[in-house]
Amino acid sequence: MSPKIERICAIAVTGICILAVWSTLLWASGPPPGLVAEAIALTDSGRPAKSEREAIQGRLREMKASMATRELVVFPVRLGNELSQENAVHLAELIREGFGWRVEVADTPLPLEVAPNRSEQKVLWGFARAFQAQLRENSPPADYALLADYHLSPRDGRVMAVHFVVCDRRGEWVIVDFSNSHHADFRRISPTSASDCDRLVASRLQGYWDD
């Protein structure tokens, strides 16, 4: 090996050693807590990263500023393995009355595949991603699209949770919402039927406008 090549190898080895020592010192007490917390949150809940959650807030502000001239389409509501056009019509009426928006009901149901899970957050975000994927493949016939998902007990019909997602025409999330017995408006409305769930969605939607 020539002296020149030997010097180059020595410099490279020295650099690698310095980098290894620096990395060991930097991570000696583990990775930064913020990174750990973020990784755990994403793993446990299925939530998107903080940057995407901030982007959702920006899209909501844009929607709130522009809905006077925009239109919303409501897709048939998910009721377990069924899709309810009737509830979509009722929900659209509640939104028209409460907001004065132009609202239409989609003629075609939007079947989604959402994996069951004990974690409500994972179910919520799985639902949100499935809805997003559908809209990205098939652009909705309005500026914004809403899909609601009602979780009723198959044993006694008890309403366990209500989820809904609003996306823009590109399929980007604007609102991803869930409510259950831990939420004040869920307890106030105390839903016992799918129609009550429609009212809860309208109430939750109003909450975003009142913020």
Image: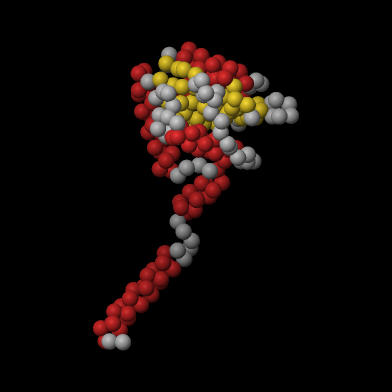
Q: Residue at x 41, y 23 (%)?
A: 142
Horizontal relation, residue 120 to residue 25: left or right: right
Report the front residue among 99 and 182: 99
Q: Quadrant of residue 25?
A: bottom left
Q: Quadrant of the C terminus?
A: top left
Please, which colouring scheme is shown? secondary structure
In this view, the residue in front, 11 or 136, is 136
- Report whether residue 69 is seen: yes
Q: Position of residue 140 (x, y in %)?
A: 44, 27
**Position in image of residue 134 (x %, y %):** 49, 34
Quadrant in which the N terminus is drawn: bottom left
Residue 211 appears in the picture as rendered: no
Q: What x and y, as percent, mark residue 71?
A: 40, 20
Q: Residue furthest left?
A: 4
Residue 64 screen position, x and y as percent: 38, 24
Q: Residue at point 39% right, 25% down?
A: 143
Question: Residue at left 54%, top 35%?
Answer: 127
In the rendered structure, the answer to whether residue 110 lies left or right of residue 168 reads right
Residue 80, located in which quarter of the rendered image?
A: top right
User: Up-down: is 155 above or below 49?
Assistant: above
- Who's the residue at 25% across and 83% down the image? 4
Reply above or below: 77 against 5. Answer: above
